[in-house]
Amino acid sequence: MRIKPFFKSYFETPKDLDNASSRLYVITHANIPFAMLIHILYIPLFLWMNVPEMALINIFSVIAWAFVLYCIRKIMFSTAWILFTGEIMIHSGFCSHYVGWGFGNQYFLFTLVGMSFLLPRKIYLSMTIAVAAIIEFVILSRWSNETPWNGNPDLLYLLNVINIVIALGISVFDTLHYKLIIQQTEAELEKANSKSEKLLVNVFPLAILEKLKNKEETIADRFDCASVFFADIMGFTSLSEKLSPVELVNLLDKLFSLFDGLVIKHKVEKIKTIGDAYMVAAGVPTPIKNHAEKLANFALEFKLCLAEFNLKNNQSLRMRVGINSGPIVAGVIGKSRFIYDLWGDCVNTAARMESHGMPEEIHISEHTYNLLADKFEFESRGIIEVKGKGPMPTYFLRGPITSKK
């Protein structure tokens, strides 16, 4: 029952490691027990073969591998790999000297060549280890004795084959293990990228997101005609004084989440929320001809949605809504926490339509009225004095025209 927790804790990587270091940590952890086991088995084998020098060397090898494991767990990768390399190269040299080339221990040098390139950001150390291992292999192949051990040649051949198989097995195991770790990392990155993508789509219009991905330095567009919607909760200051911070945020979150659903349904573009204000546009960032109509339908359902929300949540929230249409400049500003925003007289007038509006009314400018007069019913408000704009004829949107008069 305790085996699984042990293996989980043994292979679990420290949280502060980057991906490359984590891969090295896991693979070396997987190899060290194999290395220790091989050297432990070598001890009685060399004693039986009457090569006590190699038995003693393998005792030191087991101790060395235990210290390598300690260094890896302490994230002392360079020290661990110097010991790692030293043990394999020294052991291969002694083994070729006392037992001979025919024993096959020198083939473990090739596993060292492959594994050396797992070192993160240590290309010079990796190259040094790989070149040193190859040079040693060449030297041993030229100058080591073929069979200094005078035992059974068939047994020596069998041990040679076993060592080759083990060396190849370790290389294959490390390659597959590394591939699995890479695939897992790629899957996690893909998942994280998908999550980031969804988050960015919620922040920016899709067309703008594509421009950001293409690293366009300045994202700015001019639209000949688009429509802008502003809505604001009346009496919000007094409401915020009555509710706790958590209650207030929860209330706004519930309400604005409903509005977000309407944005998706009507295929308009949410621009931002400013405190208790909600800003939407149609005809940006992709120009469309029926932008005013889309925003009018959105506004009508927006009004119904607020009434439903009040009924279900025992609230009496009242909002002013203003809509205007006209030329707009849109773009992304800032270097941190940047946003997609709108500018121009059209935007300012839409904000004035909201601030000069009436509770639970959809206040429309003359520009928007002219675009919708043949599709929707309106009530004229007459000419009113609008701050910063002067006298303006405005209208209240009542609904779509149901029949020809």
Image (cartoon, rainbow, N blue to C red):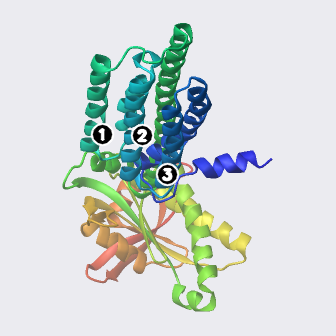
Residue 150: x and y, percent? 49, 14
Residue 151: x and y, percent? 53, 14
Distance between the Cα atoms at labels 2 and 3?
11 Å
Question: Residue beneath label 2, please?
Answer: 87
Residue 136: x and y, percent? 29, 28
Q: Nearer the viewer, residue 310 or 352?
A: 310
SS category of the residue bearing label 3: helix
Q: Residues within 10 Å of mark 3 (few under 14, many from 20)?
A: some
Q: Earlier in the sequence, mark 1 or mark 3?
A: 3
Q: Which mark is residue 217?
A: none
Q: Which mark is residue 126?
A: 1
Q: Amino acid at mark 2?
A: Glu
> Which of the 4 image quadrants contains residue 133?
top left
Distance between the Cα atoms at labels 2 and 1?
16 Å
Q: Nearer the viewer, residue 132 or 291?
A: 132
Q: Residues within 10 Å of mark 1 (few under 14, many from 20)?
A: many
Q: Earlier in the sequence, mark 2 or mark 3?
A: 3
CB under 8 Å between discs 2 and 1: no
SS category of the residue bearing label 2: helix
- Residue in the picture at 30% in, 39% down: 126
Residue at the extreme left of the image, as rendered: 217
Residue 194 appears in the picture as rendered = no
Question: Residue beneath label 3, please?
Answer: 67
